[in-house]
Amino acid sequence: MINGKEYTYYEATQEQRRQERQSRQSRRELEALKAIKAPPEEVQKAQAKLSKQLGDYKRFSFSAGIRPKPERYGVINTSTGPVTAKRAVAASRATRESQKKIREQAKQLEKPIFQRTYILLTLQMATRHL
């Protein structure tokens, strides 16, 4: 029971997604206010709204027993500071691509070693029969 309402797992995940959409919308509004150099009071009001939404999101997620997913609500906190979800996805994609290249290179290196081992074993077997 969360905030006086009973949720199934599915309903809880849908509520979580709804809150994520709201926080993304608030983040876009905050970034727009900063881009147009809005008065500081409006920016602070938008920051407070976003902060409250993120707090509610985290409380709901923990109460429902669902892991909060920061990649969905627009910010990932790292040791170097906040990273937008778009940049985090791009970094993740770059990491996967570099890992794929490393695996391909390792396969190319293994291939000649395997062939050399096969040839050596074949020669050893051939010399035993002589």
Image (cartoon, helix red, strand yellow):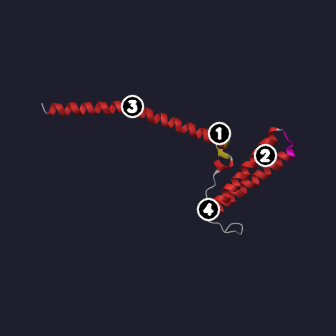
Q: Secondary structure at mark 3?
A: helix
Report the residue at 82% width, 47% height from top: 44
The residue stretch that appears in magenta: 37-41
Amino acid type, label 4: Tyr
Left or right for 129, reference 30:
left
**In this rendering, is residue 34 above or below 5?**
above
The label shown at residue 29 is 2
Circle 1 SS class: helix
Q: Contact (CB < 8 A) between labels 4 and 1?
A: no
Q: CA distance from mark 1 to mark 2?
A: 19 Å
Q: Which residue is mark 4?
A: 10
The residue located at (80%, 40%) in the rendering is: 34
Q: Main secondary structure of the magenta part?
A: loop
What numbered label is drawn on residue 109?
Answer: 3
Q: Which mark's residue is nearer the viewer, 2 or 3?
A: 2
Q: Amino acid at mark 2?
A: Glu
Q: Quadrant of the N terminus?
A: bottom right
Side (left or right) of 7 relative to 30: left
Residue 99 vs residue 20, the one in the foreground? 20
Mark 4 and mark 2 in contact (Cβ < 8 Å)? no
Is residue 13 positioned above or below 4 on the image?
Answer: above
Q: Amino acid at mark 3?
A: Leu
Circle 1 residues within 10 Å: few <14, some 14–19, many ≥20: few
Which of discs 1 and 2 lies nearer the camera? The answer is 2
